[in-house]
Amino acid sequence: MSMLIGVKGLHKKYGKKPVLKGLNLELKSGRIIGLLGPNGSGKSTFIKCLAGVLTPNEGEITIAGKKVGIETKEIVSYLPERTYFSPNMKVKETIEFFKDFYKDFREERAMDLLSKLDISLDSKIKHLSKGTREKVQLVLVMSREAKLYLLDEPIGGVDPAARDYILKTILTNYSEEASVIISTHLISDVENVLDDVIFIQNGEIALSSSVDDIREKNGKSVDALFREVFAC
Amino acid sequence: MEWKFNSEAPIYLQIMEQIKAQIATGVLKPGQKIAAVREIALEAGVNPNTVQKALSELEREGFLYSERTAGRFVSDNKEKAENVQSELCKQYMDAFTENMGKLGYSPKEAAKKYSEYVE
């Protein structure tokens, strides 16, 4: 397993407010990593820096040996917290959109997943429920053959059955060369699929460990540990 | 098969336990092929790396063996299977004794209750 992501001294401020305060991290390929932290801890900001949609104030991020930029966008598949499709688009138009944008997009895979989720290609985005919109977007993001998938709250708005299906989709579609970073606060739902977890607190890394180590050392689940570490 | 996980022990250990139990109880028979890593991962809803780790450990402990291209199989190792069986038996007995103790039965009384129950 090779090194996929290197983060050195990453700082990000919004105005004067520091959000990320010097993150250092190395992540290997072939892992599913949970990015966990309370609201406002900097999870989404960190993911946006990795995706290249925010520019850090200080520090450096490399993905597969390249500095974050145009080249890394080709190998990073990013699922933002919000949907960005025009409400008037039809599902099949969003597929065309992705096909145009990304050369690693696999149309057949997207079609297959959408039909399994019973989502009609002719539906307009604005006519879909919030959960279904999220599913469409996740399907598109996971249908790329990327090196890194960044999923910001991918299961927040969907029902438990769909949640299982989505997690299975993630498990089936990532390859050994790729890694997946999932930010969420629904820890118990994702815990079993994670290799590693990163706890973020006030813009700093509070803990970075494998899930096995956490259970072995503490005799408790990541969910239970999280509740302890971040108890209010 | 159905997989159940508790939230205390590492998942790979729990997968190992459950496969060992299946070997001990004869659900998995010597020479039988084990499903592929991805297949088990999907079925159990866990990470493929976790399944990989569990299976390699089981191989190291001699419960499974792999053949290069064909996959992984259950070893023909009666002794190991019997060890697991007696280990599981002990666990169940301990749990039974403990629970009966909570009800106020001494181990002897519990044994008597049990033999009455199975008659």
Image (cartoon, rainbow, N blue to C red):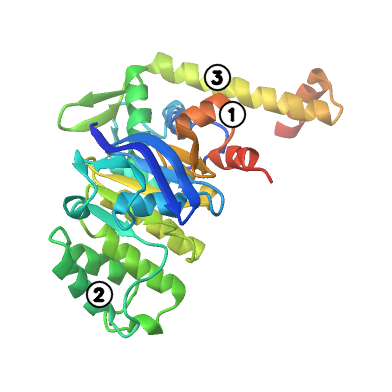
- Where residue A197 appears, as percent x and y from the top left, is 45, 39
Kindly identify the residue that appears in the image at 29 percent across and 70 percent down. Answer: A114
Kindly identify the residue that appears in the image at 36 percent across and 23 percent down. Answer: B57
Q: Chain of mark 1?
A: A
Q: Residue B87: give its label.
A: 3
Residue bearing mark 2 = A94
Give the class, few, some or many, for how many residues have Cα within 10 Å of label 1's Cα (few <14, many ≥20): some
Give the class, few, some or many, for how many residues have Cα within 10 Å of label 2's Cα (few <14, many ≥20): some
Q: Is residue A127 above or below residue A43?
A: below
Element under disc 1: loop
Give the class, few, some or many, for how many residues have Cα within 10 Å of label 3's Cα (few <14, many ≥20): some
Same chain, marks 1 and 2? yes
Give residue A22's quadrant in the image: top left
- Quarter of the image with the N terminus of chain A in it: top left
Q: Is residue A147 left or right of residue A229?
A: left
Give residue B68's quadrant in the image: top left
Relative to the observer, which residue lies in front, A175 or A201?
A: A201
Kindly identify the residue that appears in the image at 27 percent across and 79 percent down. Answer: A121
Q: Chain of mark 3?
A: B
Residue bearing mark 1 = A219
Question: At label 1, which amino acid type do we have?
Answer: Gly
Q: Residue furthest top?
A: B79
Mark closer to the chain start, 1 or 2 = 2
Residue B25 seen in the figure: no
